[in-house]
Image (cartoon, grey):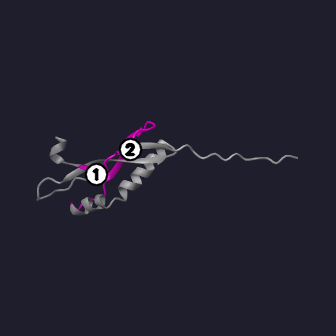
Amino acid sequence: MGALCRQHTEPVVKDYRVIVHGVLAPASSKNGPRPRGFYTARSVRAASRQDAAIQVLALVQANPRVDEIAREWRASPPDITVDEIVELEPGEPFDDTPQGFIFYNEADMR
């Protein structure tokens, strides 16, 4: 009798660039305009778009700068949502995504 073979296949991992948007709750400030939100992007390797989103949300939420901004302005932690997910083309630079944050304030929303 022949033995049954189980074929083990690894999930196909792709490169994604994910842009997220964080929104801080409004709060009064006597020191002038305060950040109201931010945008940032990260590149990750993931088995799906959903996995890419989960990874990036965890990375951004764990970033000390996000906590620092909320504490500095006595705001609750920001609501962070995925704005866009782009699957990178083969050969497209993976590490080319800037790691910074772009903050905006109340005046920028008008």
Spot occupied by residue 83 in the image (x, y as percentages of width and height): 35, 42
The amino acid type found where label 1 is placed reads: Gly
Q: Earlier in the sequence, mark 1 or mark 2?
A: 2
Residue 109 vs residue 84: left or right? Answer: left
Spot occupied by residue 32 in the image (x, y as percentages of width and height): 11, 55
Against 66, residue 49 (above or below) is above
User: Around disc 1, counting alpha carbons within 10 Å, would you say few (fewer than 14), some (14 to 19), or many (20 or more)?
Assistant: few
Q: Nearer the viewer, residue 78 or 39?
A: 39
Query: Which residue is the site of mark 1?
Result: 100
Residue 65 vs residue 49: left or right? Answer: left
Residue 82 image-quadrant placement: top left
Residue 18 numbered mark, or none: 2
Residue located 26% across and 62% down the image: 68
**Residue located farthest toward the front when viewing the structure as drawn:** 91
Asked if residue 17 is among those painted magenta in the image, a careful observer would answer no
Residue 81 numbered mark, or none: none
| Secondary structure found at label 1 | loop
Start-end of magenta stretch: 73-102
Against 31, residue 16 (above or below) is above
